[in-house]
Image (tube, rainbow, N blue to C red):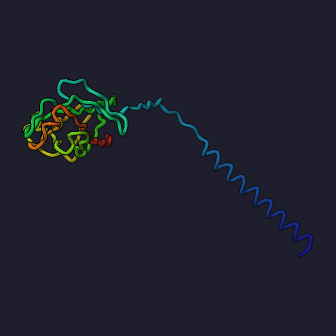
């Protein structure tokens, strides 16, 4: 290829590059267009639940693995049962009032001196009536709404008298998933 042909080819490539860059720059100007927008507000909310036993103050549940102390059942005689109503409330603070929760209730576990003789059961009340036994697998709680859980403890008829005055610790898990 001669010098003259090489110069023509080089000039042609230079013109093509300049035209290509000019086209891209023109398109880039369209991408930089601006439009006015109204001010937007972003708000956050805190998801939380509280639990309250009969005759006790409500306690917030906000941390995984958190333990809450509730008043115990006293004067339980062998072969008898007592039921404690526990009010679970969705205390979330979303301004829209729409932060609901799906709550799963775990099975109660007993530890301590009475563990071998103390039976437990937890179920959702019919309204606030713990005399109706309906086991929950999941509760739906809208923001600001409550449900009553009933914790029934039964001392076995064969519990030895030597355990009189002994105590036990009853635990159960609550798992909650928030949803709008």
Q: Nearer the viewer, residue 34 or 47?
A: 47
Query: Residue 119 lies in what quarter of the image?
Result: top left
Q: Quadrant of the C terminus?
A: top left
Q: Residue furthest right?
A: 3
Q: Is residue 32 left or right of residue 36?
A: right
The image shows residue 93 at horizontal and vertical percentages of: 33, 29
Q: What residue is shown at x 45% (from left), y 31% (from top)?
A: 40
Q: Residue at x 30, y 41 (%)?
A: 176
Give residue 143's position: percent from left, percent from top.
27, 33
Dividing the picture into quadrants, the one containing residue 47 is top left
Point out residue 35 in the picture as x, y percentages from the top left corner.
54, 36
The picture places residue 146, in percent across and down from the top left corner, at 21, 33
- In the figure, 10 relative to 75: above or below? below
| Location of the N terminus (image quadrant) | bottom right
Q: Nearer the viewer, residue 159 or 29?
A: 159
Q: Is residue 163 above or below residue 20?
A: above
Furthest-bottom residue in this view: 1
Query: In the visual, does 42 lie left or right of 144?
Result: right
Q: How many marks?
A: 0
Q: Is residue 146 left or right of residue 80?
A: right
Q: Nearer the viewer, residue 38 or 63?
A: 63
Is 136 or 8 nearer to us in this picture? Answer: 136
């Amino acid at each position: 290829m001669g010098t003259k042909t090489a110069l023509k080819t080089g000039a042609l490539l230079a013109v093509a590059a300049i035209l290509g860059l000019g086209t891209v720059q023109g398109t880039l100007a369209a991408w930089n267009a601006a439009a006015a927008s109204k001010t937007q507000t972003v708000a956050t909310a805190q998801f939380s639940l509280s639990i309250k036993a009969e005759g006790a103050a409500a306690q917030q549940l906000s941390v995984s693995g958190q333990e809450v102390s509730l008043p115990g059942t006293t004067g339980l005689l062998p072969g008898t049962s007592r039921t404690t109503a526990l009010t679970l409330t969705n205390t979330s603070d979303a301004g829209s009032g729409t932060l609901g929760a799906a709550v799963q209730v775990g099975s109660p576990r007993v530890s301590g001196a009475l563990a071998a003789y103390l039976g437990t059961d937890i179920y959702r009340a019919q309204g606030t009536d713990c005399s109706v036994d309906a086991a929950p697998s999941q509760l739906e709680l809208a923001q600001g709404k409550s449900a009553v859980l009933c914790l029934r403890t039964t001392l076995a008829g064969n519990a030895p008298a030597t355990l009189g005055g002994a105590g036990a610790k009853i635990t159960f898990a609550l798992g909650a998933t928030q949803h709008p």
